[in-house]
Structures are given as structure tokens and as C-alpha cells.
Amino acid sequence: MKKLRVTVEGKVFDVVVESLDEQGRVVAMPQNPAVQVYQQSTMAPPPSSSAPKPSSPVAAGSGAVTSPLAGRIVSVDCQVGQAVASGAQLVTVEAMKMNTFVYAAADGTVASINVTQGDAVEEGQVLVTLS
């Protein structure tokens, strides 16, 4: 087994991997067959009772419109100060070559836009805040 540090889209992970021979057989079996992955900032594996939850750079409040999935921002379809009705399209997120449209859940005014076209986002991350 080897301990490696991997960086994916700016996030650093420490991982434990098995060594394979030329035929693809495991050279040394780990004590725990599951690969352990954890973020460098915590330097400890996540609790086994629950999966890690994505962090959002902005706390989600009552007017927060969050991403329904992890992906990349294709377009921001609103502007700060714009009045929007419930059901208005605010952002388009692409994941696995499929576009997902994010709509306003209630009437309001766009108070802030927390993403730009091309940004990578995580599920639950605040995209737009309505007031």
C-alpha cells in the first residue's frame, strides 16, 4: 500500500492505494480493503456513520438558491437587482453533458450572484441569493 497526495480541481486529498504487479494482481493486501480518502485540511477520515457533505462558500439562508447537483456553470441567466417571479430560470448547470436549469422557488429580487460561467459547483452550493 502507498499513501499519495492527489489534487483534483484545487482540492487536495490524501489517499491510500494498493500496489499491483504487471498482471494487475494486488501485491500487498491492505488490512482494510476499502480505499480511505479524506481531505488534507481535516487530516482524518470522515466519520463512518455518514458520508461527507459538500461545503458551500456561502451559508444557505431563506433566499438562497442552491445547486441541485455537482457540475459546471453553463450560464447565469439573471442579474443583480433583477426582479424575478417564482419559476424564473436563474442558472444553468451542466453535469455529464446534460444541462440542468435552476429556477427561483419564490418571487424576489436577485440580491447576489455567487458564481460565474465556467465555475465548478458542488451539490448544495449557493448559486444566487434572492431578497
Image (cartoon, helix red, strand yellow):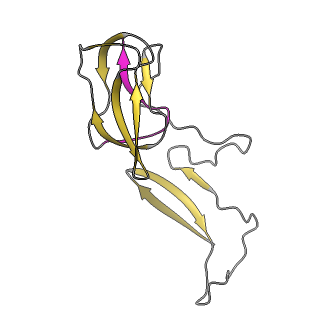
Front-lying residue, 73 or 1:
73
| Nearer to us in this view, 30 or 69 | 69
Q: Quadrant of residue 118?
A: top left
Quadrant where the image shows the C terminus: top left
- Hey, which residue is sitting farthest bottom in the picture? 22
- Which image quadrant is residue 114 in? top left
Task: Establish if 37 lies above or below 90.
Answer: below
Q: Which residues are magenta?
A: 119-131
Q: Position of residue 79 (x, y in %)?
A: 23, 21
Q: Residue at x 55, y 43 (%)?
A: 42
- The answer to whether residue 68 is left or right of residue 20 is left
Question: In the rendered image of this protein, does residue 110 appear above or below residue 39?
Answer: above
Q: Is residue 89 above or below residue 39?
A: above
Q: Position of residue 43 (x, y in %)?
A: 57, 48
Residue at 72 percent of width and 45 percent of height:
48
Q: Nearer the viewer, residue 102 or 11?
A: 102
Would residue 54 be counted in the magenta stretch? no
The structure residue drawn at horizontal position 42% and vertical position 23%, both measured from the top left corner, is: 65
Q: Position of residue 26 (x, y in %)?
A: 67, 80
Q: Estimate the x, y position of residue 90 in percent, counting from the top left.
A: 33, 26
121 part of magenta stretch: yes
Quadrant housing the N terminus: bottom right
Left or right for 123, reference 117: right
Depicted 49 relative to depicted 105: above or below: below
| Total number of numbered discs in the rendering | 0
